[in-house]
Amino acid sequence: MKIEQIDKNFQLATPSNVLEGKAYYSLPCSAFPHYGVLYDEKIGFHRLDPLVAQKTSDGVNYLNKHTAGGRVRFSTDSTTFTLSVKYDELTKMSHMALLGQSGFILLEEGEKERKVARIFPPNFNNDSGFSGTTVLQGKGMRNYILYFPLYNGVRELTIELDENAKIGNGRSYRDEKPILYYGSSITQGGCASRPDNSYQALISKWNNIDFINLGFSGNGKAEPVMADYLGSIDCSIFVCDYDYNASTLTELKERHYPLYARYRELKPTTPILFISKPDFEYDAYSLKRERVIRETYKKAKALGDENVYFLAGKTLYGKKDRENCSVDSCHPNDLGFYRMAEKIYKKLISIDEKYR
């Protein structure tokens, strides 16, 4: 028996190509397990079934290729790491850091702490992709996690390591089904400055549980086809952040409870956490919208559903320095996301200690 048969960290992966002392790996491949994203040769990385995306709306079909929540975990003893990415386009917004929108970040993972190995921001003037390289510190096998862009598609992704570097699958997530998040641009990650600063990524750092981000900027509208798809996903809990993208109070009333009802029909026992939006003071209808969501929760409880929970969005930023929690009185900055993560994490633990 060989050591690589009993310890995956000593497996030698097969590179796509070897050139001048470097080994190249085209993702996806077994050496670099990916989480939170799917892959198709025609469209690259994406987040949900392309046919479902097409049936839902043009917006969801477009945003499906944004890799919010995508990650790769691996371990290696390589002394160098190079990332090469190809885009169909480069997303640029005036109020969100380009690194968070379209870049990658590589963290070295310890048992309890992480440190930044390298950020990979795209070239602002290159819409087709970029490459970045770094020297990896330390000796022996080290664990890493690579976070994908929040607001950009990734057509192709290549990782380059030393030619004879060992590769393992990195740290594993706990033996729990992933947490499923559905909602709006805030759910997608706007406007975090780094891909690992979305509230879902922060919670996952704290409890080491996998997650799926189905936030669609401006397009989380609780369509029936989306409700069916959400109900097809095997998850440990469904965090329903649907509020923002209902264009009117009437639309929210028409769609919020039916989303719950259809999901519960497909998933009779999966816990559901309803959340309302955090920036209530900037929308005259925010508290009325919150009441609509709370009514869904109350009605479900009245019908005997003991697996539904509610978290008021107005509590997510806290009371002090609320004005410093968003970039535009709507989308959270890193402080806003951190405070959201703290409150949602605490709520998850109150639902079940396994989320600690």
Image: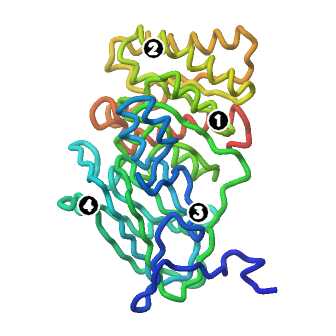
Task: Kindly indicate whether the residue at mark 4 contacts the one at mark 3 (C-beta within 8 angstroms).
Answer: no
Q: Is residue 48 above or below residue 121?
A: above
Amino acid type for the residue under numbered disc 4 = Ser
Residue that numbered label 4 is attached to:
128
Task: Kindly indicate whether the residue at mark 2 contacts the one at mark 3 (C-beta within 8 angstroms).
Answer: no
Q: Which numbered mark, 1 or 3, is in the foreground of this view?
A: 3
Element class at badge 2: helix
Residue that numbered label 3 is attached to:
33
Q: Say if residue 314 shows up in the picture.
A: no
Task: Kindly indicate whether the residue at mark 2 contacts the one at mark 1 (C-beta within 8 angstroms).
Answer: no
Q: Which numbered mark, 4 or 1, is in the foreground of this view?
A: 4
Amino acid type for the residue under numbered disc 2 = Leu
**CA distance for labels 4 and 2:** 38 Å
The residue sitting at the bottom extreme is 20
Q: Earlier in the sequence, mark 3 or mark 2?
A: 3
Q: Say if residue 39 shows up in the picture.
A: yes
Q: Which mark is residue 348?
A: 1
Residue displayed at 51% across by 33% down: 182
Amino acid type for the residue under numbered disc 1 = Leu
Q: Which numbered mark, 4 or 2, is in the foreground of this view?
A: 4
Q: Which numbered mark, 1 or 2, is in the foreground of this view?
A: 2
Q: Which mark is residue 159?
A: none
